[in-house]
Image (spheres, helix red, strand yellow):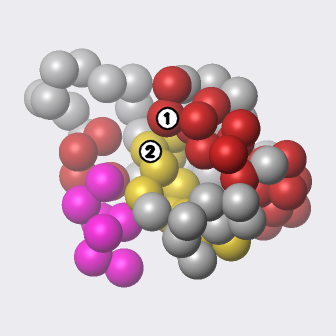
């Protein structure tokens, strides 16, 4: 699964991240903080377990806020899929 999120990797922000956090459980947020305690740079990707999600892995890509399809957020999503 691919999740585009802010560089802080705070899954309590954003509709998709919130859904992932509520379904996977707090362990997914803990793993994000363990792997990147200070967050990540835009364009970086953090890989976590899926926990309560129906997938094995989640790729959290840090990107800029959505701007109707004209920014870098889409490129991060594509990069995550290609991993």
**Residue at position x 30%, y 40% from top?**
73
Image vertical order of residue 8 relative to residue 15, above or below: below
User: Quick one: which residue is furthest to the left in this view?
Assistant: 70
**Callouts 1 and 2 close, C-beta under 8 Å:** yes
**Quadrant placement of the N terminus:** bottom left
Q: What stretch is highlighted in magenta?
A: 77-83
For label 2, the crowd category at 10 Å Cα-Cα, with few meaning under 14, some 14 to 19 and many 20 or more, is many
Tell whether position 82 is magenta. Answer: yes
- Rendering coords of residue 45 (x, y %): 51, 62
- Rendering coords of residue 39 (x, y %): 71, 47
Seen from the viewer's position, the closer of residues 59 and 38 is 59
User: Is residue 24 shown left or right of residue 54?
Assistant: right
**Residue at position x 68%, y 71% from top?**
49
For label 1, the crowd category at 10 Å Cα-Cα, with few meaning under 14, some 14 to 19 and many 20 or more, is some
Label 1, secondary structure: give it: helix
Residue 58 in sight here: yes
Look at mark 1 in the image and give the residue it sits on.
Answer: 16
Look at mark 2 in the image and give the residue it sits on.
Answer: 4
Q: Disc 1 and disc 2: Cα gap in Å?
A: 8 Å
Say which label, 1 or 2, has the lower sequence index.
2
**Residue at position x 47%, y 49% from top?**
3
**Residue at position x 73%, y 65% from top?**
51
Residue 8 in sight here: no
């Amino acid at each position: 699964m691919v999740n585009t999120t802010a560089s802080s990797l705070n899954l309590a922000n954003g509709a998709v991240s919130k859904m992932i956090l509520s379904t996977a459980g707090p362990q997914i947020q803990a793993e994000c903080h363990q792997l990147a305690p200070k967050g990540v740079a835009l364009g970086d990707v953090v890989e976590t377990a899926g926990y309560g999600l129906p997938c094995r892995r989640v790729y959290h890509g840090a990107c800029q806020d959505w701007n109707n399809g004209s920014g870098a957020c889409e490129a991060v999503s594509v990069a995550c899929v290609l991993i």
